[in-house]
Image: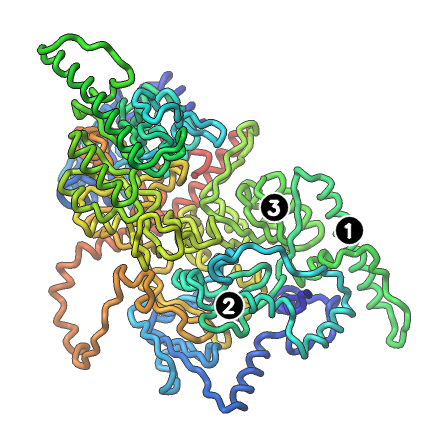
Amino acid sequence: MLRITHLFLAVLFGAAPALWAAPVSPVAFDDDEEEEEAEEDEDEDEKDHWIAVVGGDVHTGTGAVLRGATVVAKNGVIEEIGWDPWFPEEAEIVDAAGYFVYPGLIAMEAAPGIVQGGGAVEEEDTHGPHGLDTQEIANHLARFATEPQPTQAAIEDSYDPFGQNLILALATGITTTVNGDAAIKLKRREIDDIVMSEGSLQSFTWSRRNPAGKRALREKFERASEYTRELREFEQTKSKDDEEKGPSDKGVDKQVLAVLGGQTRAKFTANDRTDLLSLARFAQEFDFRPVIEGCQEGWTVADELGRAGATAILTPRDTKRAREELQLETGSTIENAAILYRHGVQIAVVPGSPDVNLGGIMGRDLLALPIEVGFAVRGGLPEEAGLASVTTVPARLLGISHRVGTLEEGKDCDLIVTDGDWMHYETFVQYTVVAGKLAYDKQEEVFFSHIRPRPVVEVEETEDETEPAETPDEETEEVDDDDDDDEGENDDEAAGDDEEGADEGEDEESEDEG
Amino acid sequence: MILALTLAVLASDTPAAPGQVGGSGLAIRSAKILTCAREGAGVVDRGVLLVRDGKIEAIERARDLEIPADYELVDVGDKWLMPGIIDLHCHAGAIESLFINDLNDVVYLTNPGLRAWTGTKPGNPRLLTGLQAGVTTVLVIPGSGSSIGGWGVLLKTGHDRYEEMLLRNPGSMKIAQWGNPESWGPGVAKTFETYAIRDAFTRGLAYARRWHAFEEGSGEEPEFDPQWEIFRHLLEKDTQASVHTQVYQVVLKTITQIKGEFGVDVYIDHGSIGAWRAGGIAQEMGVPAILGPRNADTPARGFINWGQLDTEGFKGIAAGYQEMGLELIGFNTDSPVIPQQELPVQATIAARLGFDDSEMQAVRGLTIVPAIAAGIDDRVGSLEVGKDADVLVISGHPADPRSWVQRVWQDGEVVYDSETERRRW
């Protein structure tokens, strides 16, 4: 019923204000939970689970690429990434030699069927009202120290760890997704600790079609910021023994208060340039960073959205017809993500359909997530920002960036091993590791094993020494090499030209207006 | 649209640009030209393309060709050139929105006299968006609500007047063998649909033979009948039947009845739901397959099993036809079912799901294969001497979603330029 954990997770990545400095129970931190678990395991004399993903080119997501490195994890947490690290003999081994290793992808939107198995339908939000004040939160925290959070149990009850769509999500490289407003780790064959955060985003509406709604929301924000000011003054002036009551929180919307305090982020759905601009100004006025889903005409007001510190959740292939009656830039463009990014807006990419489409029309659903990101890159988004759009940016939105989104020591071992550049359309995920366990192996599942099957590696000890004899072959392959080079150059060129194109596009705009 | 209008104004007030009809010559230099010619490698590295009067005049490696002095040189650097992309299953040319649908007049069960061109809208925003992705030729066809929908029309998307756009009319005769006409009238099923098609072909071809005989001088002049006119084109093989067909049983019927029994040139549209098993017979009978937008047979247990598939994994339909030995495999969007600009995504998914692209089959499936299927490979579909100068400048392999189209020439005229267009799709 209550969203407690996320408020404190939010503190980890947002600016932590004094307002919520209630007594913090360590149980709110999932990391600590895991440590406790580990201790429990030792108590019960169970063995640690180790995994070593050996010899791949590790794209950590932090900018570093470690060629031929090995990722070692113990009980789901990365112990070490490096060359020739120690791991016990009994460790699960994933041979990633010749392959690429990336952080597991995060799908910001997912249909219920992904985590609840086939036949699941969208349910009404089961969360109760959020009418809590700081004292109540502290009280509840004390209670939750000893009992599980009800929503978490409900999510776990509905989780299908054997579902076909779950496996297909893993085959796409997705290791984290959402159910309702919770971030879910896509564990296979087990249910424990799948809920990573809840309620990190709070939805509001803002639309030019509903002026009264906008006025009402403005009043809520005004009241909440007034209360925040009063509370801050009160805390600064009150003496230790003062029994005096604090400022009245009458009429204060607690959701808005959480947004202003940075514990949660306000999410809006807006596509229209008018709405986006007024939203950006509204956010700057009340000093919060809006999350905007859709954002189709964002490119027309990208500077204001950038100033507002917005994050956009968008589908690059979305199209929106220009409003011909306006002598202004309107409608969608494939360059939207790139233009927003250049103006400092963080980009999270979601596919056109958040479900797995088994009707046979492939290319627009959750299984096409990397292809969807490819369309953002087509519009000029840098490839690194493309990876971030399905890893670190959604991790921050969901309040779990301390656990997932990049491959670093101390973070969760959620990773994918691919046979090529993750965004390339012919690349397949060969292995998916979730919470330090192998959750998907392409050759062991019926779905894609027949397509470009993984060659069987025959280990010959003398093979290495015969390598140099291959020089003549390289010459015959020169043509192919050339082609590859050309492609590489083209990519660079594409990025470069793109910026030029955008600049000229802006010039064009001013001409139009003149 | 603004661009198109501007160009129209320019065209009327200023002399023809280099490459256009009446203009001087145009030389385009590029790091890689995907000629997509049916035979051979289909690639010229570091090449030059000469264009004059809207036609391709020469295509050579840069070192082997001296560019004539009066030709304007455009160097596209590391970008590639390729022929304009062709979509043989498009409704978007006449459907601007959900509320303007001028194509699916399900009056009779067979309507061979209806003509799609009367519903087409030049400057249609959907087509212009497709142009920005490099789709320069479309076959606009009636919907599949009836067994015979009528005349399709082949259009070039870059021009702004119908007369300039027209590539060929009739572009095809649209047939829907199964999978949609069931909703017609009292409700019909495979037997009656097959009967209705056979009935129309029997009468139509008889009409066409009477005209053929008359024109050969061995018969009386038949009475003109607009309903059967298209069969004269089918008999003379200057148009084809384009057939909405899916499921193995039905696709077999497409091949054996329409091509085998009636002797009419035909190509498979959609061709999905297990029908790839007919790929071998299609190859024997010379029937191309233009596939999409349902591009995979998916794990059957989770879906209505129309095709009685035993599919456990994902079966790429294009890969299936290819494995069965069919050579002419192309792609379509059924736009606006899939947006016109996402035609290349059909090739993307095909290649992803195992369609062998090692000899540029995916690129050819977007270009020369549909051109051959529609009998327009003398005009479009590849960059070869004498063909129309419908040329794309693209940043990489067209099946890669990251590749973007920088510029489009149609008949030697720049009809899309990302640098001057207000925005890209």
Q: Give residue A185's mark.
A: 2
Residue A172 screen position, x and y as percent: 40, 60
Residue holding disc 1 = A222
Residue at the image point whose x is 72% and y is 61% from the top: A130
Residue B27 screen position, x and y as percent: 23, 33
Three-letter amino acid code of the residue under disc 3: Glu
Q: CA distance from mark 2 to mark 3?
A: 34 Å
Front of the two marks 3 and 1:
1
Q: Is residue A479 left or right of residue A393?
A: left
Residue at the image point whose x is 34% and y is 75% from the top: A94
Quarter of the image for residue A98 reads: bottom left
Labels 3 and 1 within one chain: yes
Residue at the image point whose x is 48% and y is 43% from the top: A318
Front of the two marks 2 and 3:
2
What crowding class fits label 3: few (fewer than 14 Cα within 10 Å), some (14-19), or many (20 or more)? many
Quadrant (top left, top right, bottom left, bottom right) of the N terminus of chain A: bottom right
Residue holding disc 3 = A304
Mark earlier in primary sequence (3, 1): 1
- B93 w.r.t. A474: above or below: above
Three-letter amino acid code of the residue under disc 2: Lys
Residue B195 screen position, x and y as percent: 26, 30
Q: Nearer the viewer, residue B418 or A386?
A: A386
Three-letter amino acid code of the residue under disc 1: Glu
Mark earlier in primary sequence (2, 3): 2
What crowding class fits label 2: few (fewer than 14 Cα within 10 Å), some (14-19), or many (20 or more)? many
Q: Nearer the viewer, residue A463 or A284?
A: A463
In the rendered image, the residue lying farthest to the top is B220
As helix, strand or loop, the secondary structure at mark 1 comes to helix
- A137 w.r.t. B91: above or below: below
- Disc 3 chain ID: A
What crowding class fits label 1: few (fewer than 14 Cα within 10 Å), some (14-19), or many (20 or more)? some
